[in-house]
Amino acid sequence: MTRSAFRLALLLLPASLWLAVASLAWGANSSSVLTLPELAKRLDAHYNHLRSLSVQFTETYHGMGMERIERGTLLLAKPGRMRWNYAEPAGKLFVMDGKYAYSYTPGDAQAQRYPAKKLDDVRSPLRFLLGHAQIQKELTDLTMTPEGSDFRLQGVPKGMEQRVSQVELTVTADGRIEVMQWRETDGSTTELRLADEQPNPPVTPETFFFQPPAGVVVVNGLPPI
């Protein structure tokens, strides 16, 4: 190689390196950008392969001139069963055995029962999360917005349009739901924060049976707020 050719190679080398680095960076960024269908597929896959799921929840309700914060453990299991064990307020319970839902608050003389098929409580769609998740079919007008390392999904749940004006989900890149927020047509909002997810904890059908405390009568009632 002649001296002039060598000098030319040195001058061109930084540009070549820059182009290589830029090309690699562009490729990495383009492969890391998720589309709505891709994220929806990850969310569906994450929950549909589970038989059961346990998470810690914090539920915040704003509406009717009040704010209510409740915490506890949520247990889901196929098919369509759930159990909400409340630590705050202690002893409160919401159970769905697949056919009926039951709600009980300590100190009450009655526990409420209502058919699962007629339940329009904002928690009801969660019973279909395991094995039935199809987020793009369950939410109409679905949109996705990046939010830091997570993503925000917004849409309207099918069949609940008369009550719920919008559902907002904060979803991780691997498809885990961290926050769910319902905005109802009356202006109230319910936010559910999920943490400490435990996939496939051992459960039995008896886990979702409701046994009323001694002296408590089970009556047919309206869905709880």
Image: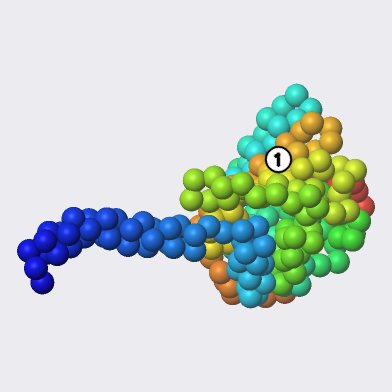
Furthest residue to the left?
3
Q: Amino acid at mark 1?
A: Thr
Residue located at (58% from left, 62% from top):
175
Work out whether residue 174 or residue 128 is closer to the camera in this orientation and state it. 174
Mark 1 Cα-neighbour bin, 10 Å: few <14, some 14–19, many ≥20: many
Q: Quadrant of the C terminus?
A: top right
* Residue to which mark 1 is pinned: 190
Mark yes or no: residue 20 visible. yes
Residue located at (67% from left, 62% from top):
37
Answer with left or right where residue 101 lies relative to residue 50: right
Work out whether residue 162 or residue 93 is closer to the camera in this orientation and state it. 162
Residue 191 rendering spot, x and y as whole percentages? 66, 42
Residue located at (86% from left, 49% from top):
160
Answer with left or right where residue 193 lies relative to residue 138: left
Residue located at (65% from left, 38% from top):
60
Work out whether residue 37 or residue 126 is closer to the camera in this orientation and state it. 37
- The answer to which quarter of the image holds residue 70 is top right
Answer with left or right where residue 12 lies relative to residue 81: left
Residue 147 sits above or below residue 67 on the image: below
Q: Find numbered disc 1 in the image and state the secondary structure of the residue it sits on.
A: strand
